[in-house]
Amino acid sequence: MQQNIAPIYEALLNHKKKRVVPFDVPGHKGGRGTPLLTEFLGQDCLKVDVNSMKPLDNLCHPVSVILEAERLAADAFGAAHAFFMVGGTTSSVQAMIMTACKSGDKIILPRNVHRSVINALVVCGAEPVYVNPGLNKRLGIPLGMSKEDVEKAVKAHPEAKAVLVNNPTYYGICSDISEIVRIAHNAGMLVLADEAHGTHFYFGDNLPMPAIKAGADMAAVSMHKTGGSLTQSSFLLIGENVNQGYTRQIINLTQTTSGSYLLMSSLDIARMNLALNGKEIFKKTLDLAEYARNEINKIGGYYAFGRELINNDTIYDFDGTKLSVHTLDIGLAGIEVYDILRDEYEIQIEFGDLGNLLAIISAGDRAFEIERLISSLSEIKRLYAREKTGMFDHEYINPEVVITPQKAFYSDKKSVPVKESERLICGEFIMSYPPGIPILAPGERITKEIIEYIIYSKEKGCSLTGTEDKNAENINVLKEI
C-alpha cells in the first residue's frame, strides 16, 4: 500500500479548514472554554481535540478514514489487521488475552510479564501456567523462555489456548519466538506477543525477529515507546487466524467510546514516518546505543550488557537499542544511580531496579546528550562508589501459584503487615514501577525470600505500587482458601 499518506491526520487538517461551529463535545470548544489549557498546549492542538463525527469516522466501528489508517498500519507491520488503541499497550495486551482466553482457559506464559497481563487474567478468569524464564545470576535479571521449557508446558497442558511471549523483555532479552510459534501452532494454540518494547523490530535492520513476521497470531505494539507516537497510543496487530470482528468486539468491551484524535493522528503520522524512514531512524538508534555501551564499559565498574549474552536458548537474541547497565559492582543499586542521575544531574532515565538501570535510546537523542549521560555515570562512580557488601544479588523469584488471580483478587481478604505475611496467600499486587513486573500477584504464596526482597526494595528507594496500602507496609492476604 501507499505508505506516504496519513488518512486521520489529513481528515483533521480538512476539518480545521472548514471552521465547523461545535455544538458537540468536548466542552472546551477548541480551547476557547479553557484559556490556560490553550495557552499551555497551543490552539492548534485544542482545535483537533474533537469528538467522532462522520467525516472523521468512529474508532468503535470505523468505516472510512480510521479504517483506511488501520489497513495502512497493518500493511506497514505485515499484519492481517491493525487496531488503533488509545488506552496504552495495557489495553492492547488485555484485549489480546481476552480474545484468546475465556474464564477457566489456561494460558502459558513467563512469570516476568507486565502487570497488564495478570490484570487481564483477573478480569477474564483465565488460569496462568508459568514457564520459569530462568535467571542471569550476575545481572539479577529474568531471561527469556527456552523452547524446551515451552514444549514441556505445552505437552503438560494440551488444553491451553495460547502461549504468551515477551518480545523483548524490558532488558532487551528475546526468546526464540519463531520456534515457540512452531511448537504452539503444532499443538493448536495461539501465540500472543507483548511487544511493548519491540516496535522498532518491524522497521530496522540487525534487530530481533518481530512477532508477526515469526507467525505470531497477535502482538501488542507500544508505538509511543520507540515508534514516535504520543504517550498512551498503541497498535494491536493480528494475523490471519484471528477473527477481526470478534477482536474488535473484545476491544470495545473496555476501550473508550471517545477515542482521542490526538492519539490516533499521532499513530497515523508515526506509522507513516516509520514506514518511510524506519531503517534510517533505527540505524541511528543502534549506533547511538552501541557507542554509549562501549564508552560506559570503558569507565569500569559498570557493565552495559549486549549481544555477548546470547546463548541461543533463554537469550536467543538481544535488542541492541536497549542500554541496560549493571551497577552493583560499584556498590550501588540501579535505583540509587537512577535517583542520583535525576536529582544531581537532571538526567531522567527509564528505570532503575536493584541491580540495573535502563536508558531508552532513540533517534530523537543527540550525541552531546549521550556524552552527558556517559560523563555523569563516570562522575557518579568517582563520587559515590562503595564496597559491594550486603547487595541483593538477584531479581527473579519463582512464585508458587495456589489459586487463580481472579479467584484470589475477589476473595475475602484481610490486611496484615508485610513482615508477618509469610506462608499466606497474596490477594493483591505488589511491584516496582517501572518496570511493572509483579513481585507478588494475587493467588501466590508469600515466602520469606519475597518479604526480604520487598523490604530491601523499599530501603533502596524503589517505588512500590499495587497494594491497597499506599505505603506498602501492609498487604492484603486471603482470609481462607
Image: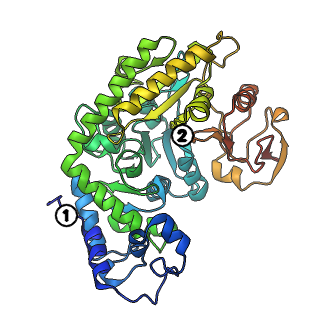
Find residue 237 and report its horizontal and vertical position in percent.
33, 55
For image coordinates 60% across by 31% down, the residue present is 344
Residue 235 appears in which quarter of the rendering?
bottom left
In the image, 407: left or right of 378?
A: right
Residue 268 appears in which quarter of the rendering?
bottom left
Circle 2 residues within 10 Å: few <14, some 14–19, many ≥20: many
In the image, 327: left or right of 315?
A: right
| Residue 374 badge | none
Asked whether residue 252 is in view, the answer is: yes
Is residue 7 or residue 249 the one in the foreground? Answer: 7
For image coordinates 34% across by 59% down, the residue present is 267
**Label 1 SS:** loop
Find residue 133 and report its horizontal and vertical position in percent.
50, 29
Residue 477 appears in which quarter of the rendering?
top right
For image coordinates 37% across by 51% down, the residue present is 223
Circle 1 residues within 10 Å: few <14, some 14–19, many ≥20: some
Residue type (three-letter) at the residue carrying disc 1: Ile
When the figure is inspected, residue 29 is found, relative to residue 299, above or below; the finding is below
- Marks 2,1: beta carbons within 8 A: no
In the image, 302: left or right of 423?
A: left
Residue type (three-letter) at the residue carrying disc 2: Val
The residue beneath circle 1 is 5
Distance CA(mark 2)–CA(mark 1): 43 Å
Find residue 112 and report its horizontal and vertical position in percent.
53, 36
Find residue 116 and report its horizontal and vertical position in percent.
54, 50
- Which corner quadrant holds the N terminus? bottom left
Q: Earlier in the sequence, mark 2 or mark 1?
A: 1
For image coordinates 39% across by 36% down, the residue present is 361
When the figure is inspected, residue 325 is found, relative to residue 69, above or below; the finding is above
**Label 2 SS:** strand
The residue beneath circle 2 is 129
